[in-house]
């Protein structure tokens, strides 16, 4: 599952769980692109539960869209990641190095209040 919800004029909430295949990755990236189109200096809250690595087809779709994903991520200043997986916390904070100008911080699932506070600064 990949769901993107608009939460105010400059914020998106993203929920991910399970495994993304090629078709669901295309839909997910299209939705992320369309809902972030008018965002400037945005915030993003990502909640990742029961996550499994995407299929090779899904990774191929993501790689084929890297240029547009870099442009999309420039619309955001901060992203908070809520997850129960230690490795996802490390990966998400490492991704901050790939997107200059985007500050990414990972939180435990039970730290939603802390994540919301950090995003609102």
Image (tube, grey):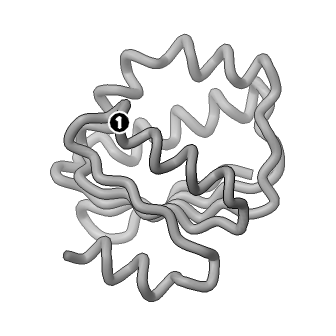
Q: Image point 45% across, 39% down: which residue?
A: 95
Q: Identify which residue, 89 or 28, lies in the foreground.
A: 89
Judged left or right of residue 53, residue 76 is: left
Q: Quadrant of residue 85?
A: bottom right
In the rendered view, tell whether residue 8 sits above or below residue 78. Answer: below
**Image location (x, y in percent) of residue 13:** 47, 63
Q: Measured from the top left, where is residue 70 in percent x and y?
A: 34, 26
- Closest to the observer, 11 or 119: 119
Q: Is residue 42 above or below residue 97?
A: below
The image shows residue 29 at horizontal and vertical percentages of 54, 34
Q: Is residue 20 left or right of residue 35?
A: right
Crowding near the residue tagged with mark 1, few <14, some 14–19, many ≥20 C-alpha atoms within 10 Å:
few
Where, quadrant-wise, is the C terminus in this rendering?
Answer: bottom left
Q: Secondary structure at mark 1?
A: helix
Figure check: 98 above or below 68: below
Q: Residue at x 60, y 39 (%)?
A: 28
Seen in the picture, residue 23 relative to 80 is either above or below; the reply is above
Residue lying at 78% horizontally and 38% vertically, measured from the top left: 53
Find residue 72 and report its horizontal and vertical position in percent: 33, 34
Q: Which residue is mark 1?
A: 97
Q: Which residue sits at x=29%, y=40%? A: 37
Please give the count of numbered marks on the rendered protein: 1
* Horizontal side, residue 50 vs residue 100: left or right: right
């Amino acid at each position: 599952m990949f769901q993107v919800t608009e939460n105010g004029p400059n914020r998106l909430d993203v929920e991910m769980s399970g495994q993304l295949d090629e078709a669901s990755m295309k839909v997910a990236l299209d939705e992320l692109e369309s809902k972030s189109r008018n965002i400037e200096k945005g915030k993003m809250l990502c909640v990742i539960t029961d996550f499994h690595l995407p299929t090779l087809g899904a990774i191929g779709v993501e790689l084929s869209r890297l240029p547009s994903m870099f442009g999309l991520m420039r619309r955001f200043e901060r992203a908070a990641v809520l997850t129960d997986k230690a490795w996802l916390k490390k990966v998400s904070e490492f991704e901050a190095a790939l997107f200059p100008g985007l500050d990414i911080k990972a939180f435990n699932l039970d730290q939603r209040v802390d994540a919301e506070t950090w995003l609102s600064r």
